[in-house]
Image: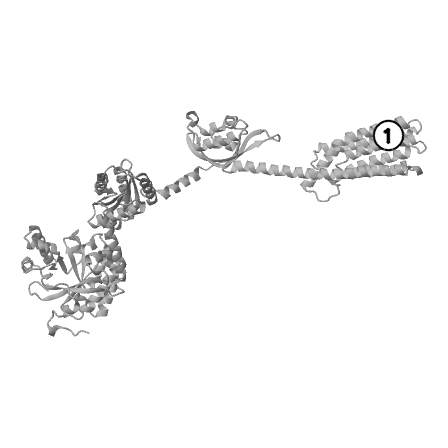
């Protein structure tokens, strides 16, 4: 502030420049008053003072004025760009020079013997001092240099003994002006620094805003009081693909509405924007569609109203950003949350919402709405053999067919896997559900062309109707699922409507599953043995091990019930292994030529430790591998499972015999007979009964199977022989072994041992 600082920062330089600029601006005022004082002295003291003194003092005063004007002009020419403390000190020297000139005038001109001259001169000095204090108020060093000599001179001016009060007044006056000059300079510097900081912040904000618009994804916009665009920024015009001059003065809502302006059909976001502008309300994060060159974009806008110092509304100023990408991502997330990504159909959650809505709309109607569950038949075989990519393409075609079938207001979707569902909100009559289910089965059962493969799958449908089958979505869905389970159990390719007894069957199955999980631990299972005899000799050549279950509360439970439950609950593997070990231990007590046959499921063959379990059972029991016969059904080969064939080959390599059970009752194929060396083919009882009644088809099938087996070096076993006539018939047809109630029902192990002559019995225990 005084001009004695050593380090010159940009801020200090700007303050010094402002101080000097103000002082230079006041120089003409100060010099003008000095010249008036010069004229005053010539008029008052020209008669009684030597002319040389007046001229000399006047020349010095004019020289000081010229010096001050020259220094001020030089600083103006440099635009104060290079000012520093030295300039402040030079200004102080100028002030000191002028102050000393007035001090000299005190010694030269007034006389103490003329009080009038003294008071006139004091009046002149007081004006000069106040003018100097004002002109040097931003340069305290110059003010001090100017006022200090004059203030000291007033002591000389009022040197008389009776003028003490005047001396004190004059000195206090000078000191007061000097103090005021210092205070004014301090206030000036503080205000200038504040203004400089505000300007710097304003520049930074302006720079950031420019960079924000140029490099960022957002832009600034503003309107006038009439809601017309004003002060169009380049970024704003770029986002609208228009020139700034086209936008200047145009109504904001009209520009954003695009072609919709003529029709008046605005989006809700535009209506909201217009309301905010109309009511002069703040708004933020307002998302609205904007048409840009025929394409719709999504913008997010925020703004606040502007007012001047008098409270007059000036318009709006705000910021906008293009959020089209975020909006599309959000829509995609919603799509994924409600629709199946593979087929594009509504997913399970969306189906649930549709069912809830249908149930709410169907209240009070009978019939109300219907829910159909659809499951593809034989899809797993295609997925396993041809791969998941082929399976996915097949599911996409299934979805397209389902959409074509579900006309009117039927709502179809995918539950998951190969399961689909349909919601019928309005059921006109009880036959409408059956007609739609039949149309679905027909459409989905037609052949599919996927890549180079011609594929066939079927469809099973279970349906439930509100309110009789359920008034809530969960209950209606469970009813349809039970009906679907019934349709699958009846062979597939069918539509089954829900019936109340299905719930009882499902509950019984659930109870059986829960009890079956404890059956092994609580020793509730046991094994019975049914004899297999030589057809010609009638001698026992083996037994088939048959598992039985007696529950302490439910009593004996039929294998037809619990075996199916065990397979679905994935309990068949541990139960089958227990039967295998038990049967091998028992067979070790029989004569060496008697075999034991044990049924093996497809799930057991697919287990990686199955061969190890068989070897372990043989080792623990001491039974020879050649005396163990494992029975498999044709279901093992339905999926063309190479792993199952590999396991069968490993078992054959151990010397274990293989038997093909229920041949001809399922999806028979001669292909797997050539790939796997079976020892025995078992003929189902249904053919034996048919042949005994003279049915030509059954007789032909038995003859064909016997001939096929003999040509492949295999034996045949006729199951279910219960009478002498049936025995004679299968003998004539060439069956080598027979099994059935005629020779013995499934029996306990101690009863099986008694069938052998005592000399051939092995010691038990």
Residue 465 located left or right of residue 44: left
Viewer can see residue 253: yes
* Displayed quadrant of residue 629: bottom left
Question: In x, y percent, where is residue 545?
Answer: 18, 63
Neighbours of disc 1 within 10 Å: few (<14), some (14-19), many (20+): some
Question: In x, y percent, where is residue 577?
Answer: 24, 63
Viewer can see residue 344: no
Residue 241 located left or right of residue 468: right
**Which residue is at the front of the view, 208 or 631?**
631
User: Quarter of the image containing the N terminus?
Assistant: top right
- Callout 1: SS: helix
Q: Name the residue under label 1.
A: 58
Q: Residue at x 76, y 36 (%)?
A: 137
**Which residue is at the front of the view, 266 or 409?**
409
Residue 303 located left or right of residue 343: right
Q: Residue at x 93, y 37 (%)?
A: 162
Figure label count: 1
**Which residue is at the front of the view, 558 or 313?**
558
* Displayed quadrant of residue 182: top right
**Which residue is at the front of the view, 455 or 400?**
400
Residue 88 located left or right of residue 549: right
Question: Which residue reaches farthest top?
Answer: 262
From this view, report whether residue 32 is shown above or below residue 585: above
Question: Which residue reaches farthest front?
Answer: 364
Question: In x, y percent, where is residue 336?
Answer: 37, 43
User: Quarter of the image containing the C terminus?
Assistant: bottom left
């Amino acid at each position: 502030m005084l001009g004695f600082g050593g380090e010159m920062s940009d801020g200090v330089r700007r303050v010094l420049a402002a101080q000097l600029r103000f002082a230079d601006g006041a120089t003409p005022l100060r010099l003008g008053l000095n010249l008036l004082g010069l004229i005053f002295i010539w008029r008052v003291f020209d008669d009684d003072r030597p002319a040389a003194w007046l001229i000399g003092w006047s020349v010095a005063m004019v020289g000081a004025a010229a010096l001050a004007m020259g220094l001020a002009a030089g600083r103006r020419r440099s635009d104060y760009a290079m000012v520093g403390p030295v300039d402040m000190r030079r200004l102080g020297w100028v002030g000191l020079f002028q102050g000393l000139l007035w001090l000299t005038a005190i010694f030269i001109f007034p006389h103490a013997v003329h009080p009038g001259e003294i008071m006139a001169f004091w009046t002149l000095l007081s004006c000069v001092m106040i003018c100097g204090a004002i002109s040097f108020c931003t340069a305290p060093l110059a003010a001090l240099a100017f006022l200090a000599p004059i203030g000291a001179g007033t002591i000389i001016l009022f040197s008389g003994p009776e003028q003490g009060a005047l001396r004190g007044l004059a000195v206090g006056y000078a000191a007061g002006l000097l103090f005021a000059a210092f205070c004014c300079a301090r206030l000036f510097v503080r205000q200038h620094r504040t203004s400089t900081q505000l300007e710097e912040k304003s520049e930074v904000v302006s720079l950031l805003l420019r960079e924000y618009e140029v490099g960022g994804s957002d832009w600034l916009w503003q309107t006038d009081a009439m809601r017309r665009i004003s002060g169009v920024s380049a970024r704003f015009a770029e986002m609208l693909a228009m020139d700034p001059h086209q936008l200047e003065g145009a109504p904001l809502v009209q520009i954003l509405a695009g072609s919709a302006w003529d029709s008046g059909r605005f989006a809700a976001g535009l209506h909201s924007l217009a309301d905010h502008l109309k009511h002069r309300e703040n708004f933020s994060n307002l998302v609205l569609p904007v048409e840009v060159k025929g394409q719709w974009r999504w913008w997010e806008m925020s703004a606040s109203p502007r007012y001047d110092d008098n409270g007059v509304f000036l318009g709006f100023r705000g910021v906008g950003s293009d959020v089209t990408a975020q909006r599309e991502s959000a829509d995609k997330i919603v799509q994924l949350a409600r629709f199946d990504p593979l087929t594009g159909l509504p997913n399970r959650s969306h189906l649930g919402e549709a069912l809830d809505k249908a149930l709410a709309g169907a209240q009070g109607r009978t019939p109300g709405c219907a829910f159909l569950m659809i499951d593809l038949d034989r899809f797993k075989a295609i997925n396993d053999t041809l791969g998941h990519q082929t399976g996915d393409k097949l599911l996409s075609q299934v979805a397209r067919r389902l959409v074509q079938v579900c006309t009117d207001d039927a709502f179809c979707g995918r539950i998951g896997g190969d399961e689909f569902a349909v919601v019928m909100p309005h059921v006109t009559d009880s036959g409408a559900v059956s007609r739609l289910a039949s149309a679905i089965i027909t459409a989905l059962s037609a052949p599919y062309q996927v890549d180079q493969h011609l594929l066939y799958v079927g469809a099973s449908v279970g349906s439930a109707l509100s309110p009789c089958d359920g008034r809530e979505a969960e209950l209606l869905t469970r009813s349809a699922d039970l009906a679907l389970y019934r349709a699958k159990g009846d062979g597939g390719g069918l539509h089954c409507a829900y019936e109340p007894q299905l719930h009882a069957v499902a509950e019984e199955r659930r109870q059986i599953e829960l009890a079956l999980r404890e059956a092994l631990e609580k020793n509730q299972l046991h094994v019975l043995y049914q004899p297999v005899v030589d057809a010609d000799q009638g001698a026992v050549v083996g037994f088939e091990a048959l598992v039985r279950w007696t529950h302490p509360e439910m009593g004996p439970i039929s294998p037809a019930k619990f075996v199916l439950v065990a397979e679905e609950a994935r309990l068949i593997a541990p139960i089958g292994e227990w039967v295998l070990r038990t049967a091998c231990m028992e067979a070790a007590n029989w004569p060496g030529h008697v075999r034991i046959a044990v049924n093996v499921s497809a799930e057991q063959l697919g287990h990686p430790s199955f061969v190890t379990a068989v070897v372990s059972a043989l080792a623990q029991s001491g039974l020879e591998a050649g005396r163990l016969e494992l029975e498999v059904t044709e279901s093992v080969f339905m999926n063309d499972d190479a792993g199952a064939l590999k396991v069968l080959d490993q078992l054959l390599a151990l010397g274990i015999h293989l038997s093909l059970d229920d041949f001809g009752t399922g999806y028979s194929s001669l292909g797997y007979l050539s790939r796997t060396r079976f020892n025995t083919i078992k003929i189902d009882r249904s053919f034996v009964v048919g042949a005994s009644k003279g049915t030509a088809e059954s007789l032909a099938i038995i003859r064909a199977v016997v001939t096929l087996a003999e040509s492949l070096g295999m034996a045949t076993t006729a199951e279910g022989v219960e009478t002498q006539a049936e025995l004679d018939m299968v003998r004539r047809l060439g069956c080598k072994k027979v099994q059935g109630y005629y020779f013995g029902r499934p029996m306990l192990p101690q009863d099986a041992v008694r069938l052998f002559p005592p000399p051939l019995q092995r010691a038990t225990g």
